[in-house]
Image (tube, rainbow, N blue to C red):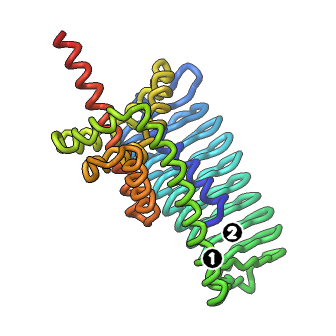
Amino acid sequence: MSKNRKLITLFVTMMMAVCMCHPAFAADLDSAGNVFEAGDSVSLPDIPFFGGLIAGQTVSADDTDAEGSVMMAGQSVEMNDGEVGESLYAAGNIISIDDVWVSGNIYVAGNNIVIKGSESNGAYVVGNQIAFDGVANALYAAGNIVSVKGTINGDAVIEADVVELDDDLEVTGSLTIKSVNEPKVPDNAPIKDFIYEPESRGEQQGGIGALGLGIGARILKKLTSCLYWIVAMAAFGMLLCWLAGDHLTKASELVRTKPGAMIGCGIISWICIPVIVIALCCTFILAPIGGMLALLYVLLLCAGLAFAGASLVRIFLPNMNVFLSALIGIAVLEVVRMIPFIGTLVGILADMYLLAYVILTLWDNRLKKSEQ
């Protein structure tokens, strides 16, 4: 998948996630004639409205009559027999748009996408499996398997591993196909200008020599990155030993004395803090608090591996110089972090370790103040 396709998919997925964090609202129109609704199963009303945004597990719209734009996000998104005065945005797992007239553009991102009998100015679709059968002045479709028919009154660009062109496809402008496999163009299809741009899968074009050089370059890059982060985290670890040596010792003691509390608190805080941040930001009034909490959370995550390496090593090397032992612990964790999958897990566990220590320390301080 190209960089643009990844960015588009990521953007719309984030929009869908943010929308689904809102609580459920009634489907009534507000004073501006708009609809805003979120919940498990939601739908747009079958009465005229200006614009709408709905998000949920199952999202549907029948006989839609919108003067402005419509945005829909969910696990299953379906829209049938409607008119949209501006643009239509849809994101989800399974998306079906059938017999919808859109004055503006159609923007869709998902897994399995079907657009049938619909008309729009432009159609821009990113997904896994895409089936387009409609009318548009421009088409851009990117996915793994893309099937196209209908009429494009302009240019069409398709990026996919497998491209299927129907006999009924009509393209009045240029049709550009970017794929590892050259598609079969129907002999009777009225296509004005066909352009095929072959794409490679990386190693397929290079041969054994190029493959070896590529692997060697990646290994060298990994080693360089590992060395850089060892030095950077070691410097940060020295600073921690100097400014927060007592906290490093206390954290290692908590692992020995309260392992269950450290594990449970680390898992809960690592999962719940982002959820709390999103909830605070969605309330608008408490958004500044959510932003400050998010900044603090990110800072703690940045220090997680250095803190864990400098602290946990004291369990195994209690009599060694604290600075030297911190260097060893951080270096070991940084090397392990470069291992695929295992490195990600180590990074997460290190973050949980620091979060657990911070939460338990704050809790102990609160208990001490309440006892005084």
Q: Which residue is mark 1?
A: 163
Which amino acid type corresponds to the residue marked 1 in the rendered image?
Answer: Val
Which amino acid type corresponds to the residue marked 2 in the rendered image?
Answer: Ile
Q: Are marks 1 and 2 in contact (CB under 8 Å)?
A: yes
Label 1: how many Cα within 10 Å (few below 14, some 14–19, many 20+): many
Instruction: Residue at 83%, 75% (x, y): give it.
Output: 193
- Rendered location of residue 7, percent (x, y): 62, 54
> Is the residue 84 above or below the residue 330 in the image?
above
Instruction: Residue at 48%, 18% (x, y): give it.
Output: 285
Instruction: Residue at 51%, 26% (x, y): give it.
Output: 29
Q: Quadrant of residue 9?
A: bottom right
Label 2: how many Cα within 10 Å (few below 14, some 14–19, many 20+): many
Q: Which residue is mark 2?
A: 158
Between 21 and 209, the one nearer to me in the picture: 209
Farthest-out residue, top: 372
* Labels in figure, total: 2
> Is the residue 189 above or below the residue 32 in the image?
below
Between 370 and 235, the one nearer to me in the picture: 235
Farthest-out residue, bottom: 208
Residue 257: which disc?
Answer: none
Q: Secondary structure at mark 1?
A: strand
- Rendered location of residue 91, percent (x, y): 52, 50
